[in-house]
Image: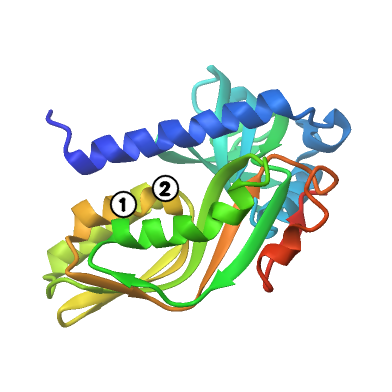
Amino acid sequence: MKIGIIEVLVILSILITSGALVYKYISTDLSKDTYEFDGEQMYKCAWISEKIMSKGFPLYAQVYGKWTGTGEAFNGTVLILRARGGTLYGLYNDHIISIGGNMAYREDIAAEKIVLKPLGNTIIYYQINPVGGDSFKEIINKIENTKRPYEGLNITILETYISGILAVDSKTYTPTEQQYIRNEMDDINRGNKLTLNFLDGGLSISGRLNLNNLELYDYLIKPNKVYTSKMTIYLIVNETIMDLPKNITQYNNDTKIITLN
């Protein structure tokens, strides 16, 4: 089976994210008291997970347990998408799975131990005015330029997310083309919910997007022009608030900080 350029780029974006994740795990001493749970603590685990994700931090979990359908042992890293009650829902090997406690039978995984691994310790965020260009690559470059003051502060930016609306001039899409784009967007964004509005001559995209993935849309949509609303830029950094320069909020009047703990 041939792999298309979009699929190749999606795989590369996942590898880049994985590299940032490994760096985070190595460089940060996570508190076992806060982030490690046994199979009887699923409600607490789900509550902590929801709290972390509500702040905007990507959340991974190392899960130890078994598949409820076969009894086969499970030991894997899962991207957590949401938490409800005593159940976690996540992405594993491109499939959505559910994770319950050690006595679970309705969920896909009965967990004996879960170690939550949020990406980053602090989020720096700020707003920028609308930007435009002939491609998503141009939009990326203009957003990257706004990061330069922060990159000069000797901090480790693990991932960058943007939130707002992107209006795209391209073509009028047929129903099957629309569904294809929706499917590809779901794969690319892996848990970040987007709203797509298809219009005559193009579409609009709204929601939270990983900046590293934005260039994939040039291959998927082939835009003639892209223009944004005011955008909020989120820099997920490895440093704690105590490690950040005291004057970091002076680089942009709108700069604010969210802490993990």
Residue displayed at 23% across by 56% down: 218
Residue 17 image point, x, y percent: 49, 36
Q: Looking at numbered disc 2 in the image, what kind of residue is underneath it?
A: Asn
The residue tagged with tag 1: helix, strand or loop? loop
Label count reads: 2
Who is closer to the viewer here, 134 or 163? Answer: 134
> In this rendering, would 29 be left or right of 178?
right
In the rendered image, which residue does mark 1 sit on? 215
The quadrant holding residue 154 is top right
In the rendered image, which residue does mark 2 sit on? 212
Who is closer to the viewer here, 241 or 30? Answer: 241
Who is closer to the viewer here, 78 or 8? Answer: 8
Q: Residue furthest bottom?
A: 200
Residue 61 image point, x, y percent: 64, 34
Residue 215 image point, x, y percent: 31, 52
Q: Are marks 1 and 2 in contact (CB under 8 Å)?
A: yes
Who is closer to the viewer here, 13 or 76? Answer: 13
Other residues around mark 2 within 10 Å, as few (<14) / some (14–19) / many (≥20): some
- Can residue 69 be spotted in the picture? yes
- Depicted 37 relative to depicted 106: above or below: above
User: Residue 149 bears which disc, if any?
Assistant: none
The quadrant holding residue 94 is top left
Residue displayed at 81% across by 49% down: 241
Residue 112 image point, x, y percent: 72, 25
